[in-house]
Amino acid sequence: MRQLRIVLTLGALVAMVMMAQADPPGIASAPAEPAEQPEGKDPPKKPKDEKQPEKKLPPDVFSSALVPRREPTRTYQPNMMGDFPGYFTRRTVTFNGVQTTTTTTVTQGNPAVDPPIPGTTTTTTETVPVNQPRNVLVHTPPRGAFKVSENTSPRPVDRVFFCYNFYGDIRGPEPGHRLPLTRVEPGAPPPPPGGGVATSSVQTVLPGAPSLNVHREVIGFEKTIFDGFGSIEVRLPVTQQTGPREGFNFQNVGDLWVGTKYAVILDQDTGNVLSGGLAITIPTGPSLDTVAGSIHPVLLQPWIGYIWNMDRFFLQAFHSIVIPTDSRDVTLLFNDVSVNWWLIRREDDRPLSFVVATLECHVTTPLNHRGLEEPIVVPDLVVLTAGLHVGLFRNTIFTVGMATPVSGPRVFGHEAFFQFNRRF
């Protein structure tokens, strides 16, 4: 078998050499020199309508270098995975609590008799359900997948995608927000010794803000332009937020996201990429209800991203600023970096083309409105995300992973997600 492979290899090399020595296609061979004519006879004339073959020029090296070639598997990196957005709005929500009223009753005695009859003091309590407002921070999911680093790559790609995210135990950045709130209203002074009835106190206990679970689905596509050096991406989120109390639940289509991308460096040999663009979150979903009124601006997000390959490892990152068109909203700085390791990498069209292990670090920094009493609050967050990208053939990627906060207020417990990307 080994000898047969050697023979076939040598045969292929010989065939390549012979093909290289042959005339290139489209260029006619030079006409043979005419045979010497006998003296006294004119050489034969060429027909007037015979056209000389056009000589093709070699391709323009510089223009062809600007057209991306179909990249091999080793130069196509999977997308970044993303993390928890972390938007909270301060709202007044009605809570179902209990109210306890304490009443003191003093009866008049008769000290004139023998023996004297003293008065009696009786305290009674009555507990009833009550609905009262409470000012709390509520997680607000309508903006959806607005971070540019979520399920995308600095490389422009033709693809369609579907993502599912589950965020568990969302509890907000406000200290003690999950503890019950007790309000005590002092009543009238005690009754005189002569007798009477007075309400001594009214105590109202409202439950704490509940922990929430969020399910989010995102569908979208990305289409390349400018010969593969740029692209336009569109995302549409659908979110379901569930909690045990009214005022915290949400189920609706979120804001539409449109992003542009252009690669300044797109090296098809090394796979290194340097790109930038602008993402726009269009307020097509529900508005954000806050104590300062309805807030629902357009979000402008300029960004830069890059990919740097190092044999079996590659670095991928995005840096962006979210600028709202409403000054009451928060301006954010995002720094998202991932380190990736090729566990399996194949250059052919096998069903399993690659497996990549990924560890991502996502840093969210609010640049203004940093207080917890603001109408919109986004805390400082550092989130770690880990997962696996599995490539099938050359055009399908399945991604699974989990995320958790590692610093700042632990505004959620965990995140689990699944992503599907199909190139075309």
Image (cartoon, rainbow, N blue to C red):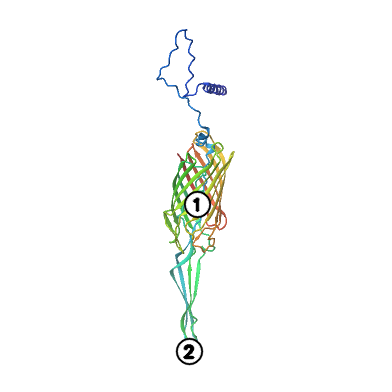
Above or below residue 315? Residue 363 is below
Q: Circle 2 is placed at which residue position? A: 110
Q: Residue furthest right?
A: 310
Residue at the limit of the structure toward the front, as seen here: 40
Where in the figure is residue 304, as x and y percent of width and height?
Answer: 54, 47
> Residue 46, relative to residue 397: is it above or below?
above
In three-dimensional space, the C-alpha distance between marks 1 and 2, rounded to whole angstroms, equals 82 Å
Q: Amino acid at mark 1?
A: Gln
Along the line of sight, the residue nearer the viewer: 359 or 378:
378
Residue 210 shows in this picture: no
Label 1, on which residue?
301
Point out residue 45 in the picture as x, y percentages from the top left corner.
43, 15
Q: Is residue 5 above or below residue 394?
A: above
Query: Residue lying farthest top?
Result: 39
Type of amino acid at the residue the image marks with label 2: Asn
Q: Which of these two is toward me, 151 or 54?
A: 54
Q: Residue furthest left?
A: 49
Residue 8 shows which numbered tag? Answer: none
Please indicate, yes or no, whether residue 365 appears anywhere in the rendered image.
yes
